[in-house]
Image (spheres, coloured by chain):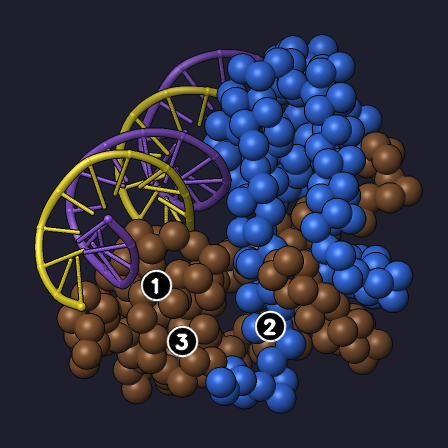
Chain colours: A blue, B brown, C yellow, D purple
DNA sequence: TATTGTTATACTCTATAACTATA
DNA sequence: TATAGTTATAGAGTATAACAATA
């Protein structure tokens, strides 16, 4: 097997491949009573902002376009994980809010994801965990540039 | 802002969020004359295997189902990046092969992705690069468990 | 006139089930 | 009967363009 062309300076390419495959792997773990990665991300962002925010703000944080938020919220509202109300002073805007059920499912999904990592990845060492913990803010730095 | 619930042991969840956002960020860089992340991954895998392999093998390596490979190959063949021929001894099988154009575009995409990382992420230090370089095989270990 | 959110539409990526051809 | 690949179909996630409501 050959390594990829320009392998010597291939950090970004390798990172691109590794992240795609990790998300595919996580999707294969998906069960209908859990959150998809995209739902997990949206609810996490809402939680981080105190559990309530406008669609526009949410779209900016998630780095998606507003219609994508509209669509995602439909599914989450149908599942009673999110509610909406009109903004008190600007009636163009909405306030999206995590329900208690949304909060609970977010916590359960967080736990389940970590449990999966613990039980499925037998030979992940403490050093590996430390490396990943260090890498995550670097990836986030790349994302936000 | 609050951190996510169960934040203390939230490595897998944080990794899930970071990878989703990195792929979104990379998608926003996409231009019609380049490769999507999924195409990049498929061509990289073919390259690593010497530039030729069967659809079934490719599906296994990419961890997708065979119909997904069929569909992806249509686009790549239309773009003359991949050709196909019948397996010499088993006429049920195909051999998919990178074309010279496919090789060139893969190399260009690799270069472009690294160039993007270099030019857009101004404050990525050598230590950051070292951390990411160490993290990539760990992520791949997780993927293949 | 500018901003917020939605609707309409379309494309990519992915899966499962059913099918065809070959072994 | 088993295996390789394709077709048919469906669903999630995403975008752009056009629209309605409100500021």
Where does label 1 land, which residue?
A: B56
Residue A77, horizontal then vertical, whole percent: 57, 16
Image quadrant assignment for residue C19: top left
Label 2: few (<14), some or many (≥20) within 10 Å?
many
Q: Chain of mark 3?
A: B
Q: Residue at x 69, y 46 (%)?
A: B17
**Mark carried by residue A14:** 2
- Residue placed most toward the observer, A24 or B78: A24
Quarter of the N terminus of chain B within the rendering: top right
Rounded to the nearest whole Å, what is the CA distance between mark 2 and mark 3? 15 Å
Q: Quadrant of the C terminus of chain B?
A: bottom right
Q: Under tag 3, what secondary structure? A: helix
Q: Is residue B94 above or below residue A95?
A: below
Q: Of the numbered discs in the image, which one, if any, rests on residue B46?
A: 3
Q: Are marks 1 and 3 on the same chain?
A: yes
Q: In front: mark 1 or mark 2?
A: 1
Q: Secondary structure at mark 1?
A: helix
Are discs 1 and 2 located on one and the same chain? no
What's the residue at 33%, 80% (across, down)? B52
């Amino acid at each position: 097997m050959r390594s990829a062309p320009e392998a010597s300076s291939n950090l970004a390419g390798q990172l691109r491949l590794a992240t795609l495959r990790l998300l595919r792997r996580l999707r294969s773990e998906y069960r209908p009573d859990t959150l998809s990665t995209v739902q997990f991300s949206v609810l996490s962002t809402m939680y981080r902002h105190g559990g309530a925010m406008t669609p526009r703000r949410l779209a900016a944080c998630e780095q998606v376009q507003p219609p994508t938020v509209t669509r995602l919220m439909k599914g989450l509202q149908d599942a009673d994980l999110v509610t909406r109300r009109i903004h008190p002073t600007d009636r163009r805007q909405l306030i999206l809010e995590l329900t208690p059920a949304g909060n609970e499912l977010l916590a359960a999904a967080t736990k389940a994801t970590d449990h999966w990592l613990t039980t499925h990845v037998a030979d992940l060492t403490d050093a590996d965990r430390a490396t990943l913990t260090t890498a995550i803010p670097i990836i986030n730095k790349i994302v936000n540039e």
